[in-house]
Image (tube, rainbow, N blue to C red):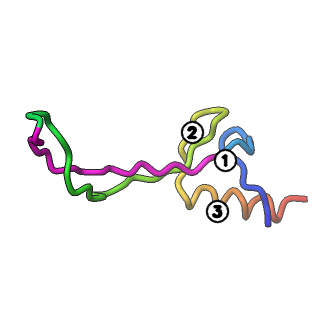
Amino acid sequence: MKQIVCPICGSQALRHIEDVFLVWTPILNDNGELGRLDPKTEGFSEYFECRECGHRPCEAELLSSAEDRRVAP
């Protein structure tokens, strides 16, 4: 297994982030307060991000960067 680095700055401080959006149905509960019912995951976004320089490389950039490192001496 190889560590993947940022294709811009070379940092190993990469992370994979997933944002999940939960959608609730609003209801009025027995106390007359707003409540939530039936959570559903409607969609999500995901991306890679370098904690050092802030670059958000796509998967192809990361794979290309890993390939370049493999053939480099």
19 in the magenta segment? yes
Asked where in the image residue 55 lies, by quadrant, the reply is top right
**Is residue 73 rendered to the left or right of residue 31?**
right
Kindly give the residue lying farthest to the right in the view shown. 73
* Quadrant the C terminus occupies: bottom right
Q: Nearest the camera: 17 or 22?
A: 22
Neighbours of disc 3 within 10 Å: few (<14), some (14-19), many (20+) = some
- Element under disc 2: loop
Q: Nearest the camera: 30 or 15?
A: 30
Asked where in the image residue 38 lies, by quadrant, the reply is bottom left
Q: Quick check: 17 above or below 59?
A: above
Q: Report how far apart the C-alphas of labels 1 and 3 lie in the structure.
A: 10 Å
Residue at 64%, 62% (x, y): give it.
63
Q: What amino acid type is highlighted by mark number 3?
A: Leu
What span is in magenta? 15-30
Q: Report how far apart the C-alphas of labels 2 and 3 lie in the structure.
A: 15 Å
Q: Which residue is mark 3?
A: 63
Q: Which residue is mark 2?
A: 55
- Element under disc 1: loop
Earlier sequence position, callout 1 versus callout 2: 1
Residue 42 location (% of width, % of height): 27, 58
Q: Which residue is mark 1?
A: 7
Q: What amino acid type is highlighted by mark number 2?
A: His
The reply to whether callout 1 and callout 2 are in contact (CB within 8 Å) is yes
Neighbours of disc 2 within 10 Å: few (<14), some (14-19), many (20+) = some
Residue 57 location (% of width, % of height): 56, 49
Residue 31 location (% of width, % of height): 12, 35
Q: What amino acid type is highlighted by mark number 1?
A: Pro
The reply to whether callout 2 and callout 3 are in contact (CB within 8 Å) is no
Residue at 70%, 38% (x, y): give it.
9
